[in-house]
Image (cartoon, helix red, strand yellow):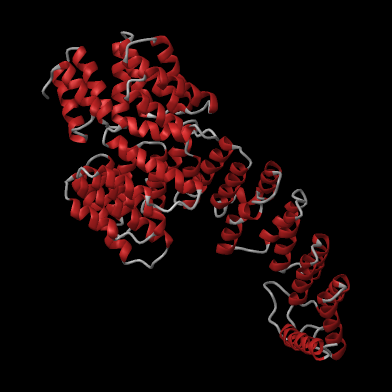
Amino acid sequence: MDYYGPMRRLHLVAATLILGLAQAAFAQPSQGGKPAGEPGYSALDAELFYQLMLGELNAQGANPGAGYALILDAARKTGDAGLYTRAIELAFQARSGESALQAARAWKQADPASRDANRYVLQILVALNRVAESAEALKAGLALVSGKDLDAALAIIPRTYSRVSDKKLAASVVEQALTEHLSQPATGGTAWTSVGRMRLAAGDISGAVEAARRAQVASPQAEGPALLAIELMDPKQPLAETIVRRYLAEPKPQPEIRMGYARALLDAQRYPEALQQLKIVTAEKPEFPEAWLVQGTLQLQDNLDVAAEASLKRYVELAQAQRSGEERSRGLAQAYLSLSRVAEKRKDFALAGAWLDRIENPQDLIAAQSRRASILARQGKMDEARKLLAALPQRSPADARMKLMAEVQLLREHKQYKAAYDLLAKATAKPPVDVDLLYDQAMLAEKLENLTEMERLLRQVMAAKPDYHHAYNALGYSFADRNIRLPEAKQLIQKALSHAPDDPFISDSLAWVEFRMGNTTEALRILELAYKNRPDPEIAAHLGEVLWSMGQRERAQAIWKEGLLLDSENESLQGTLKRLRVQP
């Protein structure tokens, strides 16, 4: 028997206990807690020392319940916050939430002014999912804080309740507990923001928007209501965006809020408005790196290559001055890819490759190699380009899919539609159903003028995912463009709009079917709004043609010229000009 091993472990435990208990005996009181020198706990006497050591040995041995009871008894005798905390810890280690709650409540009863005791009671009740009982604990805890501490305490309430199962009950309990704070000018803004977040978690979107509005009324310059409103932005909740705009109209709004608004606009595909907000951010806070990156990406998307290059280089300059990290690495990789694209468009392939050489993040390898492959293909080296993509590592199904899409995109860009279609047909023949791949295959079938196959594939996408709006729009537009089955085309496009009401490209499709049906005035109205929301050469082609048919030829030519500036190689625009025999 190894006698010395257990003895060494016992001595180590005892030494640790002596140190810990000595610290507890002379510890500073907790916030609002009882000072250690009050009667009943003047020093660590032998009896107490023995009780604590016995409690710890039981807790770490075969009888944790007895250990917990001994430590809690010592805490009651001494009123020491550290011992109450230890009793709670032991209860949690034994997975006894009720015992932990008992210890926390005993602590709160012994020292009602202790913020820590009240916080433990609240957190344990929430962890036990006893949400209804937590209202009084929440109110009691808030009553013990004031000033900035109170503001912080109100702000973290949604996080405290984030894991409860009954979100609606939690929202109701919190709102009830915050009644007094909701009506106070000093706390109304933060309190209503927390209520809004609780309502959002409960799925009450309109209620959350109303809470954000009330929060802003109470505190117009506060960031919390605006941040909440950004999360709530939706065409069905226009008040949310109004709240954001009101905040941004206040003196010196935080650029991070404006950046968040720009991201929300991007998500809604409102690109011109997003770019406008980004320009404000870069003007007001030119040292804000992310704004330059997103602005440059949007400018490149709009074929504003010179402006995009300047924005992206500014981002690189700012990002390189930051500490290294995952976010910085990914941002730099995105910037280098975009700068490579700018150089590639200018046919400066050496510079394009040099930008790609600066990418260090291995997760961006596929994107970087895709750009390299594109550069090779533009130099007439398609076989070499495809081999480059084929050599990419494939560690997971996600990697395999990304490789496939990179090769399909490469072939599509270089008009090798049959090879791209065959790649996708092979992939979609295997389960499970991938609606994105099916959709791309359908679009390639259209390029190959196999319209029967295109319709079959799109119908398959609709059956697999009924809310896949791209499929309805593509089929409806195909009918309209061929001037066939126009009532069905309109029905399909309206179905797409019901799923994506703010998509300017779907609006463009609806305008085109209206034009085909002879509703020229309505078509013009829709197209003008779509082009305003998303200046795009495809929409410019249709808007110009409608204007041309109405005799407004100067304006039509002006729109077409704008479209050519956006993308001089756009197939739809070039096809329209050729068909109408127009030289804008």
In this rendering, position of residue 239 left or right of residue 562: right
The answer to whether residue 316 is above or below residue 465 is below
Residue at x-position 26% and y-position 42%:
382
**Is residue 254 in view from this perspective?**
no
Question: Quadrant of the rendered structure where residue 482 is?
Answer: top left
Q: Quadrant of the C terminus?
A: top left
Q: How many marks?
A: 0
Furthest residue toward top:
518
Q: What is the x, y in percent for residue 211?
A: 56, 42
Residue at x-position 57% and y-position 63%:
147
The answer to whether residue 31 is above or below residue 270 is below
In this rendering, position of residue 385 left or right of residue 1: left
Residue 384 versus residue 223: which sits nearer the camera? 384
Q: What is the x, y in percent for residue 58?
A: 85, 77
Residue at x-position 72% and y-position 87%:
19
Question: Quadrant of the rendered structure where residue 479 is?
Answer: top left
Residue 223 versus residue 23: which sits nearer the camera? 23
In this rendering, position of residue 47 left or right of residue 535: right
Q: What is the x, y in percent for residue 34?
A: 74, 76
Residue 275 versus residue 281: which sits nearer the camera? 275
Q: Quadrant of the N terminus?
A: bottom right
Question: Quadrant of the rendered structure where residue 84 is?
Answer: bottom right
Q: What is the x, y in percent for residue 174?
A: 67, 48
The answer to whether residue 536 is above or below residue 517 is below
Residue at x-position 17% and y-position 12%:
551
